[in-house]
Structure formats: C-alpha cells, structure tokens
Image (cartoon, rainbow, N blue to C red):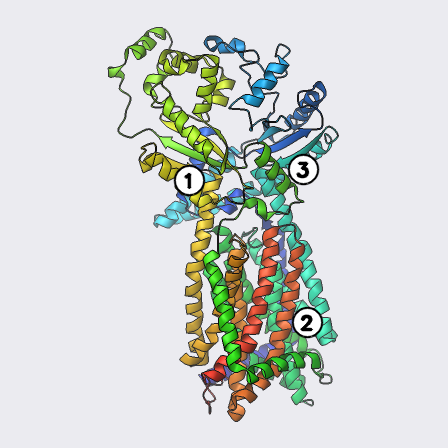
Amino acid sequence: MKRHTVAIADIYEAIVLQRPLVTLMVIAVVVLGFGWFTQDFRLDASSDSLVLEQDYDLEYYRFLRARYGSDDYLILTYSPRDDLFSDEVLQDIAELRGKLRGLKNVKSVTSILDVPLVMSPAANLRNLNAGIRHLEDPDTDRQLARTELLSSPLYRDLIVSSDGSTTAITIAFQTDEALRQLRDERAALRDMALAGTLDESDAERLSTVTSAYDKASDEAMLRQAQTISAVREIMREHQDLAQLHAGGVPMIASDSIAFIRSDLLIFGAAVFGFLILTLTVLFRKPRWIILPLLTCVAASIVLTGMIGMLNWRVTVVSSNFVSLILILCLALTLHFIVRYREIHEGQPEASQFVLVSATVRKIFVPCLYTAMTTIVAFGSLLISGIRPVIDFGLMMSIGVIVSLVLAFTLFPASLMLMKPGEPTVRNDMTARITGFFAAVIQRHPRATIISWLLLTTAGLAGLGRLSIDNRFIDYYKQSTEIYQGMLLIDSKLGGTTPLDVIIDAPRDVEPDADESSPEEAELEYIFAEDDDSDVGFTATSYWYNSRQLGQVIAIHDYLDELHDTGKVISLATTARLLDTLEPGVLDDNIALSIIYKRIPDDVRDALITPYLSADGQQLRFSVRVYESDPRLKRNALLQQIRADLQSRFGFDNSQIHLNGMLVLYNNLLQSLFSSQILTLAAVIAAIFLMFIALFRSLKLALVGIVPTAVSAGMVLGLMGWLQIPLDLMTITIAAIAVGIGVDDTIHYVHRFKREFSIDSNYWQAVERCHLSIGRAMYYTSITVILGFSILVLSRFVPTIHFGVLTSLAMAVALLANITLLPALIVAFRAVKPHLSARQLLN
C-alpha cells in the first residue's frame, strides 16, 4: 500500500509539479470547454419545482385541471381611490381590461364588468337567456348590481371585497397544448422507466421528449415573463385612480426567478468581493489572493457549465450554489496556503518544488477524506424525492469533486511558476486567538465538556419544536409586491392558496333508468322532442337533484366555517343563487332539470361546470385558504377535513380526494421533514464508518463524530427554538453543517496524530495543533461566516435564513472542533502513543 501511494505521488509530481505549464494549458482547455456550456444555464421557479416526483396527488391534480379548468391565473387587485361603482372608476377598469386583452399571450380577462348578473334586476329562471346582464350593460340597474355583487355568495370576497373597496381582475394565459402533451408523454415514459419496462427505443424517445419539453418550457416561461412585465407596465398607467397589486402562481414564479437571478449575480459577486478583502487582510500577498480566487472561479465555471450541459435547472433550493462552491473550494486552498507557509517557515532555503511537494503530501489525504465526507453529506439529499433538492445534492457533490481536483492541480501548478520568496511571519492575532482556546480547555477540560453537554442538551430540546408549517407568504419581505398582493388577496378577496375538496358518488350507487320517479318520468315527457344528453339530468346525476343538494349545502357550510378557510365556492353556491331567484326550486327536480338544460353557456361555465363533473357523479368544492394566517397548519387542516367528512357526513375514505396546490405543497413539506430527520442519522453513521477507516481507531472515530453531530443537532434545535420552519432551502442546512463540521474534524485529528507522535504529550499536541491547523480552520471559518452573512441583504427570506444558519453552523463547528474535540481526545485518551508510520497516514 505504501509503495502504491508513493508511486501515485511520484506520477502526480511528474505531471503537475514538473510540467506546470502543460497542466495549466490542459486545465484552461477544460475550463473553456465547460465555459461554453454556461450559455445553456437555466433557472426554474415553476410550480413543477415545488412538488414531489411520482406524487399521485400531482397526477390527480393535472386530471382535475383538465376536467374543471386551471387555477393558474394571474390576479390583479384594483383598489380605487374613489367609489368602485362610479363612472370614472368603471371606465378606468374597462380601459385596463382592454389593454390586458390586447396582450399576445392572454387568453381571457375577467373583471367586475364581465361576470353575469341575475339580480340586477332579478332574472326569470325559466328564461335565463333574457335575464342575464352585466355591469356595463345600459339596462343594468347600477344600485341593484352593487347590492348583488356585494352580497352574492358567488362574487362576494371573490370578484369584489365585501366592503366594496377592492375588486379582482383575473387574467388567464393561453394554454400551451404542445407543452402539455410533451409533459404527459414524458411522465408516461418516466413511469415505464421506474417500472423497468422501458426498452431502447423508448429510452431514446424519453431523451428526445425531455429535451423538447425543456425547450418548450423555457419558451413558455419566457413568454409568461414578458407578458407579466407588460401587465406591470399597464398597471403603472392606472396607478392614478387606484392602487394595484399582482398575485397568483405565474407572478410568484416570475418574481422568484428574478430573485434567484439577483441572488446568483449580486451575492455571488458580493461573496467573491468579500473573499478578496478577507484574503487581503489575512495574507497581504498578491499570490495568496490571486491563486485561491483563480481556483475558485475556475471551479465555479466548470460546475456552471456542467449544470448547463446536463440540463439541470437551478431553483430556489440551489440558487446559492455559486457562493457555496466558492466557499468549499476556498477552504481547500486555505489549508494548502497555511500548510505551505508553515513548511516554508521551517525550511526557508527549500526550493519551490520541495515546498509544494511537501505540502501536497501532507494535506492531500485529509483533504481527500473531507471531500468524501462532504459528498456523503450532500448525497443525503438525493433520497428526498424532491427534484430541486436532488439536483442540489448532485450539483454540490460534483462541485466538491471539481474543487478538489482544481485545488490540487491548478493551484499547485500555478504556484510552481512562482519563486518561494521570503518566509512570511504568521499573524500573531490569529495565534493569540487559537492559543487562547488551547489554554482554556487545558485549564478547564471538564468544564469545557460539561458546557458543551448543557448547550447540546438545550439545543437538541429544540428539535421537538422543529416544524414544517411555514407560510409561503413568509418567503418574501413585506416590501415586495408578492407579499403585498398575497396579503391583500387574503384580507379582501377570500384567501390565496387553492384547495380542492372532491367527493365522488358512492361506487355502489348507479342511476337506474328503469326505476324513474313520477317527476323524472314527467321530465322525459317534457323533453321528449329534444335530442340532448342533458334530458333528465337530475335522474342521472347523483348530486344534482332535490335528494342530495341539501347535503351539498351542508358540506359547503362546514368547509366555510373552518377557521383556516376563506372563500368556498361549489354547487351549493349555485343552489343558493337559484333558490334566491325562485324559492323552493331546490325541491323541484323538474325545474332543476329545465334550468340545467336551458342555462346560458357563460352562466353554466361560471356556476356549474367548475363544480360538478359532466356526468354529475363528482362534486368539487373550490376552497381558498388564508396563506397569511400565522396559525395555519396545512397537514392538520387536511387531516381534519378528511376525518370530518367521514364522521359527520358518512362518506367512505375512497370517495374523498383533497387536492390543489395546498395539498401538493403540504406533501412536499411532509417529505422534507421525514427526509431531513431520517437521513441525518444515516449520514452521520456513514461518516462514522469513514472515520474508522481513516483514523484506524474505533474510539477516535466515536470522539470525532461528536462535534459533527453536535453542530448539526444544535443548528436544527436552534431552528426549532426560533420557530424557523423547514423549507426548500433550510432542509440543506443539516447537510452543510455536517459537511463543514466534518472537514474541520478530519484536519484536526489528522494533525493531532502527527503532533502527538512527536512526544506523546496530549496537551503539547493540542497546543501545537491550535497554532498550526487551528489557523487554517480559523481562516476558513471566519471567511465563510462573514461571506454568508452577506446573504441577509437578499429580498428572499429563505436565502436570508440560509445565510444566517450556514454562518451559525460554521461557527458552531469551529468552536466544537477547537474546544470539545481536543477535550474529548485528551479525556478518553483517544490517540495511542508510538503510532506506526502507516497510522500516521503519510
């Protein structure tokens, strides 16, 4: 083994150190090659990035959208400074609507002017065609229209707020049928791949369809972003008479992409600039500034190009990958710099080849193991089942490999082109700081361990308070349009997040044409001359008849009374409206069937089609949930609704389907919690096994895993105490905490074993470690902590949490590794004296 290691080292030196120009030329070609693919780099903030892969509810969601229509609208809130029903305001709304309808990608625009009115004056149910009016019609009674809109169970808190101060304008975009077909075909082929039934031709088709879908999706997102930009420009033209806000999934996706792009560019550049400042302050030599940054930039270009080449999409989760790769790569180069300067100080006359070679030989093994353990930590994200999180784990795992390769090729090859110069006197301030901690733990080893035990216990107690009940509105600062729009929609227009409550007719109940009631027989006579499938609909529909509408209304009222629900619309809304126009009609199946058959198309599309399936066997209750309610607990709400529908209304569980964006997002959050907690223990166990292989000691592996477990547990516990919920970004904090903590542990233990072999004195070894490897750990940690603190300036709240928690994880990991770790090593005599050369990992 030793001979093989020496042979590999000799080959490395012959290629990289003795031929640095050739090495740099090859690296330049590779970096430029991957740089070419950076043009294929793409961002993704679509709703598809917020759902679980292979989620049954996602498939059912798409089925419901095809049956009842999309809920993916852009919503404008219009709050006039004058009376909403004044001529000037209504004229302004009409002009606004006209401009919006003129946009290329807009399919329809629905405003207060467009909804059908049946009480302005009251329409005759027997001849609805003649009685339907709209607010802008000349014969519409404006005062009656006001009363109807403000009191209608359909329009109140949906089209217009109950106080008449705000109205909503709904914008539907053109449906991209080709994109939908590509998505469905891709989903079917992926299902075949999971089932193992994908043959070679199908695999090629999957690749082709995936590429076509990605391209079509990019084009659709671009069109949508351009349309939203045009909508905002139109909104600005109408700010004189009203205050306007935009909301809805399309705008959230568009603005989220803008936030991601902003974070990538601004904070990537800010972190890079801060690294320049930090390196300047720490080392004060151009080479120790230029070479680390050159290596970090090269790693970032290679990883970005690889992401583009592999057609991975950068989402909210992975938006900080540039900052992370800069930090991880810098950590490797900082260890190289500190060790090189230490060797140079001890051998001032040595040649550059000797210095660089000695540095590589001493730090490569611990750096290799830190890279491997960091990959294991990020690899834990691969089993989350959430595509953005999986991609982030893959990105960072590949990024760690790229950083390791460049840190031991580009950096040393570039250094070989420079002269050693004079040895640098190391920073006394850094020595005083690390020496202080060495002195403290030497004087108070038990107090150090007990203090950490108490801190860890307090931190872990917070795990019980860890939650996934976050509000999507809290992802954005209060100054952003997304936040203001969602808050206004919640407070004035019946809630933001859509929830579909679907109830099927009992499976054992089938309409029987041979057992018609007298009323239903009369229906057949009335419509005998009509060749239409709607004849006798009350006889064929389980729900649309006098027997079941009472229960439909009861279910509607139950959902409406729940604390977390806002506006509820269903067939019950229609039933109440019909009963207002003609009292007693709900008990008359003949009248109900006549109404169903003769109702105008625009009224049918507004009152019936979205809430009852064409065959009349399935009900849909469209529920809005208050996203801004701090007491909102999605999973508990969904469980309560399902349980109550069974216990209070007697439905079988198979009849009940809860769906919509609220359910899909809840599934995502539930998966986040289980994958985070369950896999963290597996990751720590895997790293523990790697420690055994590296340290060749079970006791030392047990001691070494403690700081890593402590730092991860304390960060998660603190999230619980501070009530910071797990979300798409904070789920990665534990993996980062483990990756960061384990790096310092490996470097410290590796150096401790070397120092302890000199005189077998534990405390002397601790002191020497703190004055050597402790410096590199200190430099790396301070750089990371201060670098990530810049993220608090982001407009995206999860990015702020990410920056703060990553900085905290680094601080805890550093303190644990320079206090708790050496105290435990000494207390348990974890390193044995008289180590062999093999155990020293030369």
* Residue type indicated by callout 3: Ser
Q: Earlier in the sequence, mark 3 or mark 1?
A: 1
- What secondary structure is marked by label 2? helix
Q: Quadrant of residue 107?
A: top right
In this view of the protein, which residue sits in the foreground, 621 or 45? 621
Where, quadrant-wise, is the N terminus in this rendering? bottom left
**Classed neighbour count for the residue bearing mark 1: other residues with Cα under 10 Å, few (<14), some (14–19), many (≥20):** few
Single out the residue that lies furthest toward the left: 514
Residue 59: mark: 1
In the picture, measured across the screen, residue 186 lies left or right of residue 313, that is left
In this view of the protein, which residue sits in the foreground, 164 or 91? 164
What x and y, as percent, mark residue 522? 32, 8
**Could you tell me how far apart the alpha carbons at marks 2 and 3 are, in whole angstroms?**
42 Å
For disc 3, the marked residue is: 229
Residue under the image location 59 percent in, 35 percent down: 491
**Could you tell me how far apart the alpha carbons at marks 2 and 1 are, in whole angstroms?**
51 Å
**Classed neighbour count for the residue bearing mark 3: other residues with Cα under 10 Å, few (<14), some (14–19), many (≥20):** some
- What secondary structure is marked by label 3? helix
What x and y, as percent, mark residue 156? 55, 25
* Residue type indicated by callout 2: Leu
Tag 2 near tag 1, CB within 8 Å: no
In the picture, measured across the screen, residue 653 lies left or right of residue 288, that is left
Q: Is residue 502 visible?
A: yes
In the picture, measured across the screen, residue 416 lies left or right of residue 817, that is right
What x and y, as percent, mark residue 787? 66, 64
Residue 297: mark: none
Q: Is residue 382 visible?
A: no
Tag 2 near tag 3, CB within 8 Å: no
Q: Is residue 653 above or below residue 17?
A: above
- What secondary structure is marked by label 1? helix
Residue 291: mark: 2
* Residue type indicated by callout 1: Glu
